[in-house]
Amino acid sequence: MQIAQLPTSSGVASKGAGTARGVDEASTGLDGASARADGASARSAAAPLKRGLSNWDHQLQGEISNAQQTLDYLDRSSGQLQALKSELAAKLAARQGRDGQVEARVRQFSNTWRQRASASGGSLDAQLSYSSPQAAQQQFTIRGLTMASLQEGPQEVLAFSVGGANQALRSVNIEPGLSEEEIIARFDKALMASNIRVRRGEDDKLIFSTPEASWASVRDSLSVRGSGIRFPTGQMNRVRTDPEPPAIAPEEWNTSDIEALRATLQQVVQALANIQQTRESVSLALAQANSRVARAQPAQVTVSMDALAQKFNETANKPGYESLLAISSALVGISRERVISLLGLR
């Protein structure tokens, strides 16, 4: 999307303030009264000048940038996967291929996949889910925390620590008879301050999520202390976290034999389908942002030069002070040298 700055009008200072005001009066059809002209000038000066991106929401600009970056990244990834798909198909069809070409294509895409976070402005997660302005999230589960284990057994207070021993503890009170919604709400409220959100997942699991930029810290420092029912009591214990598997795992692609090549080809085809689906959602997000841009742009005011000329002609043909003022104002700054220069262009 190309963003063009809208044209704006600007005033040029001249030697005679009263003369310049006369030009405004003649061109806009004012009755020539000084008080009205001064009032119009004051209102014009008080009106804010709207121009281009300076009047747009910074968050909107970020969403547009993220969407464009992500589309560029997805297009580059798709092109590399298409090339890899062709190499795999050719090698399988002929039972041979250019030595090392498939492996080189796999390495190329692996490097591109590792650049996903930075290349998309932090908007594309490992499951190819796009989110902006919210940062891409890493979803994970905590071993031992299932809905069944939380709804069974006596009351227990679970104290969570994220970021080390000096961080404030976040406590969740588990009581018999709590509904799934109540359990989720308590975990989500307690851990929100640690930049962790909680939702109900499939297979009776609690799904935790945190920004990808915070994932390493959460993974390495998340600890919990219980009352000896679901977790040991007395001290904080590091918990085992299991991250959600990525949508594409090129490090697992094998090209050692025919069967491995076939399996890799299937994974590449699936990766292409996933990328295409994500591209459609990002394109939709960009279109919606563009629509908001159109509504955010200041209205472009067009002035008819024919109308201005007609108004000047009418004013100049009226006898009296207004005619003299309009003509003398139009002649300000016109010198003999300028007229000669202009005639020389003919």
Image: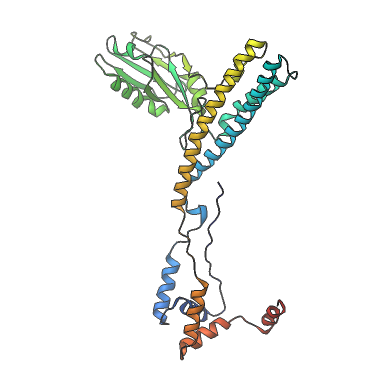
For the point 50% across and 38% down, which residue is it? 283
Q: Position of residue 295 (x, y in %)?
A: 43, 51
Q: Position of residue 19 (x, y in %)?
A: 52, 81
From the viewer's perspective, is residue 11 above or below residue 186?
below
From the viewer's perspective, is residue 220 above or below residue 213?
above
For the point 35% across and 25% down, which residue is it? 188
Q: Position of residue 119 (x, y in %)?
A: 59, 33
Image position of 211 (left or right of 77) = left
Q: In the image shown, does 97 or 285 lie closer to the viewer?
A: 97
Single out the residue that lies furthest toward the left.
177
From the viewer's perspective, is residue 293 above or below residue 329?
above
Single out the residue that lies furthest toward the bottom.
319
From the viewer's perspective, is residue 92 above or below residue 71?
above
Image position of 117 (left or right of 50) = right
Res 171 seen here:
yes
Q: Position of residue 158 (x, y in %)?
A: 35, 16
Image position of 132 (left or right of 105) = left
Q: In the image shown, does 67 or 16 lie closer to the viewer?
A: 67
For the point 64% across and 28% down, which residue is it? 80
Single out the residue that lies furthest toward the front.
93
Quadrant of the snapshot with the C terminus = bottom right
Q: In the image shown, does 257 or 31 lie closer to the viewer?
A: 257
